[in-house]
Amino acid sequence: MKMRRLFGLFAVTALGAMGAVFVYARFFQPETTIVEVPVENKIRYVNLPGSAEGASMDFTQAVDQSIDAVVHVKTKVFREYAINPLYEFFFGEQPKGEPTPILGFGSGVIISNKGYIVTNNHVIEGSDEIVVVLNDKREFNAELIGADPTTDIALLKVEADGLVNLKFGNSDALRLGEWVLAIGNPYNLTSTVTAGIVSAKARNINILRTEFSIESFIQTDAAVNPGNSGGALINTRGELVGINTAIASRTGAFSGYSFAVPVSIVEKIVNDLIEYGAVQRAILGVIIEDVTAELAEEKNFKEIEGVYVNDVRPEGAAKNAGIKVGDVIISINDVRVNSGAELQEQISKHRPNDNVKVMIRRNGKLKQFDVVLRNLEGSTEIVKRNDVFEVLGASFEPVSDRDKRSLGIPNGLKVTSVKPGKFMKVGIKEGFVLTSVNKKPVNNVKDIVDILKETEGGVIIEGVDRNGSRSYYAFGM
């Protein structure tokens, strides 16, 4: 009986509660607003990144103001037929025929409305004829103003009107990841534009084989192929920041890495060639190596930074200023240097007799030196192009002690470039080491000038080629 009462009480309570809920829901519940929350789609279309203002990246304006300043450079080298002396001994003298032209192609950049064009030295090296084709199809014969194998830069000049030229940008201000554009003529496909980013700076890839070469390339992933050499690397404002020079490839075609000479170096070389007719190379006078973890441990350095001084040249700029073996160069004119390439790039901006601030670390303490830079001959004088060298059509650099030993010579000057002149006519090539003129030994360019000033009539040149073979040449002045 008691259980029935409890069950009935429970049933009445439950029914009352359900009735209360029904009445509240029917007459008292407020209106419900349904808000849809958007779900972001995880699948996106591939596109260029937006700019800081939110707009899509657009390179068209930079290309429009640059494309007409990039030219096609065509070269010809004439080589005579090689006749076998043994064949002529049995069958008599053979007709030589016309020299066979060897054609070459590359790119160039107009940097002045006066007709000055920058390209790579390796594009025009040894050429007998140089023709420049503008973007509007006009063709002009180009004059070689000068070349610098140590940076792989050459300067041409054409006589033309209505030229569009590129303005120099600031390659020092380039940042890793910044967009850049390469313009040139790969595989003779004229006026080709590719885009990429700055992958690295101050890159040394050991392709310039001269003793005093400067390699501090801008590395990019903009597609560059044979024919792009000498073309423009521009920023998104259409300013010239580099001259495309090389690719890293196992096949000879682009495989992801390209290298350009920074415009900070190019501008200095060009100004020297225009003003003096010769490149003014400033030398610090040190033999260096990068500070690595291994070197820091060996030398007990607390920091892995700077460039280690292995040796100083006798009577060189660094030694005269007080820099010693074992010093670590930290900065040049307050610009930090952490590799030999970075140090070379900073020094390459200067001329002999320029004063630079060199910060070094010695025995854990920082010390600053004021260094007066010198030229390759060890003096602070500006080297001006002499009329004698215009006649010879050649540029020279000192021969290293290692090359002297390998060639078995006590003295000499290496020919670094040859343009139309006496040397080209008699067949002297780049790389030839000149040991004497008219039987008098030469050790520097002043020796050549002094000897030729006293010469009337014939000139006898003696020297050795790259293989060490001794050769003689003769011509009239």
Image: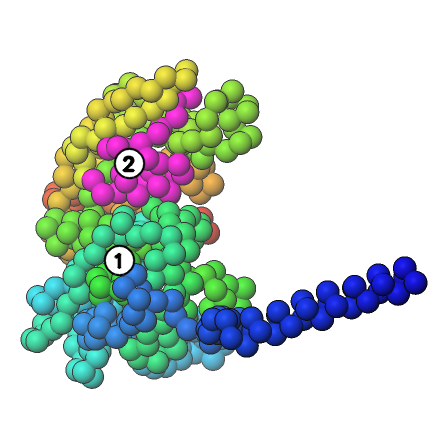
**Between discs 2 and 1, the one toward the N terminus:** 1
Residue visible at 88% across and 65% down in the picture: 4
Q: Residue at x 42, y 63 (%)?
A: 221
Q: Residue furthest front?
A: 1
To which quarter of the image does residue 222 belong?
A: bottom left
Q: Which residue position holds label 1?
A: 241
- Rounded to the nearest whole Å, what is the CA distance between mark 2 and mark 1? 19 Å
For badge 1, the amino acid type reads: Val
**Magenta residue check for 325:** no
Evaluate if marks 2 and 1 touch, with contact meaning CB atoms under 8 Å apart.
Answer: no
Q: Residues within 10 Å of mark 1 (few under 14, many from 20)?
A: many
The residue tagged with tag 1: helix, strand or loop?
strand
Q: Residue 53, relative to residue 74: is it above or below?
A: above
State the image coordinates of residue 406 (x, y, percent, origin top left). Answer: 47, 41
**Above or below 2: residue 355:** above
Magenta region: which residues?
326-350
**Circle 2 SS class:** strand
- What residue appears at the point 18 percent right and 36 percent down from the top-left corner? 352
- Which amino acid type corresponds to the residue marked 2 in the rendered image? Val
Q: Nearer the viewer, residue 424 or 67?
A: 67
Give 231 or 209, whichever is nearer the viewer.
231
The residue that mark 2 highlights is: 335
